[in-house]
Image (spheres, coloured by chain):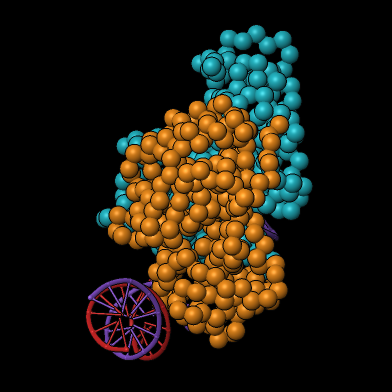
Chain colours: A orange, B cyan, C purple, D red
Amino acid sequence: MIVKPALPHSITGFVVSRPLRQNCANCGVRDVAPCRGLSDEGLVEVDRISYRKRVAPGGIIVREGDPASWCGVIVSGVVKLGKTSPGGRQQIVGLQFASEFFGQPFDETWRLSADAATPVDLCCFSQPAFEALRNKYPAFGGALLQDTVGALNAAREWVFVLGRKTAEEKLASFLLLVAERLGGEGCARGACATQAAGPLTCDLALSRTEISEYLGLRLETVSRQFKKLKEAGVIETSGSRTITFCDVGQLKRLADSELA
Amino acid sequence: MIVKPALPHSITGFVVSRPLRQNCANCGVRDVAPCRGLSDEGLVEVDRISYRKRVAPGGIIVREGDPASWCGVIVSGVVKLGKTSPGGRQQIVGLQFASEFFGQPFDETWRLSADAATPVDLCCFSQPAFEALRNKYPAFGGALLQDTVGALNAAREWVFVLGRKTAEEKLASFLLLVAERLGGEGCARGACATQAAGPLTCDLALSRTEISEYLGLRLETVSRQFKKLKEAGVIETSGSRTITFCDVGQLKRLADSELA
DNA sequence: TCATATTCTTGACGCATATCAAATTCTGCT
DNA sequence: AGCAGAATTTGATATGCGTCAAGAATATGA
């Protein structure tokens, strides 16, 4: 049985004799990341074998084709998973958020490029160390499987969005995703920011170009759809990256406009 | 350490005292399905707890929203995973082939509908039995994780196809998938039918409508693209479901027409 | 083998989104 | 604060795919 002590995310009353190190004890995603499957002993081991990576916004995390020697967990930030065709067409094939597993286990090379959309913090393992951890703590492997199945569901959801939705519905779907994943402070899995009534302001994390690459559209089209949503009073923007959701209900209806 | 005895797929010299039952010993996908992670003892257990499902072409396997009480492995056939919007728009969000895991572990209800495109054979487990199997044989869970990661990669690949490719490229991509997965008799994972030189004939498994639902197009558009490929001498058809690949190299170029 | 329903093909036309080209507004830096 | 470069918006036009409507081919069942 796995013990999950309900520690506060910020340990305020803690006597710090030397600068507080980034480790499992003060890790904000420990209870939702695959690490939730680890025992206390396992977490101690993670502290020993893991290392941190920090990538600035716009920075490259990995490039398609490079040898995949490590994997890890996203501690904070937004990661873009992309594919570029030889002719230069680009598609963001997935977005990843805090607490999600990042990597390509069972593979020698990266099949995708990954870039930081915001400042990104990663808790990293060498592939062998990671595999050893999986073998030693089956519940860790189980949690990883559960999260991978979740990612697969999300990817298939996105296949529907790209295959069947109009530009307006696509943008509405993206904005809902942003509201859900980035709307709350915690960025925790399944945050329910979109359930609340009042308006909600947050950072978009992606530029117009990046949004268009995620939605399979052109940036001009994205821009025009933003205009429509603003005119409809569903959202407001201040600058081009800060958005306020004025009417989440309407946004949900627009994401599936057939029901409206 | 897992023992993987290299038994022939068809056991010909076997003395059968009563009608040969469908079980692991004569299962064609045992060595590529997640079952490859099971010991001999585990396979005996699978024989005891698994049961077979057979679904005729066009038959419903599961419906979105139904309680997910079982999961399993596709022994043969082609399964369509679909999503339907309230307004009736349909999208096939994935195709599954022999040896692939089928199911929604960790979930109470099916998030997708699944239909048989061809006659489908499934080797099924109740969710609890399946979970017990995973817990008892960690290598089984590992193989399952590996396959799920593979499915995630395939889904992201398809996100690129839907997001950035033209109608012609989409159809070419689909036909290549068919050639790879259905071109050889064995339908085994990673079949290399498309490496061979000569022409290759096989069944499409999907109707024009289904192909259009997979590619995010309309059936008329699919039909027109078929015409183009036939006129270009890349494929031939006899009836509407039997295809001959005349020039796989050209097809590959068309699937990524930027390089041509 | 033929009759009938279904699926597929073909054609004409319209629209959503792409494309090309400025103009404008942000954003970071001095 | 003001400037320069980048990002975004806006406009005009083009086009690929969708839509609607027949008609041909194919599959199914008596």
Q: Quadrant of the C terminus of chain B?
A: bottom left
Q: Is residue B205 above or below residue B160?
A: above
Pick the residue in front: A173 or C3: A173
Q: Quadrant of residue A208?
A: bottom left
* Image location (x, y in percent) of residue A55: 39, 53
Residue at x 74% of width, y 30% of height: B129
Q: Is residue B27 visible?
A: no
Q: Would you identify the image quadrant in which residue B27 lies?
A: top right
Residue A15 pos. (x, y %): 57, 45
Q: Which percent across, then down, holds residue A2?
A: 68, 34
Q: Is residue A211 above or below residue A66?
A: below
Q: Position of residue B224 (x, y in %)?
A: 44, 63
Tell whether B156 sits left or right of B21.
Answer: left
Of the pair A103 and B82, the residue shown nearer to us: A103
Residue A108 higher or lower than D5, as above or below: above
How many numbered discs, if any? 0
Question: In terms of depth relative to the viewer, which is nearer, B15 or A133?
Answer: A133
Residue A59, can we see it?
yes
Taking the spot 60% from the left edge, 84% from the top edge, the residue there is A233
The residue depicted at 55 percent of the width and 81 percent of the height is: A236
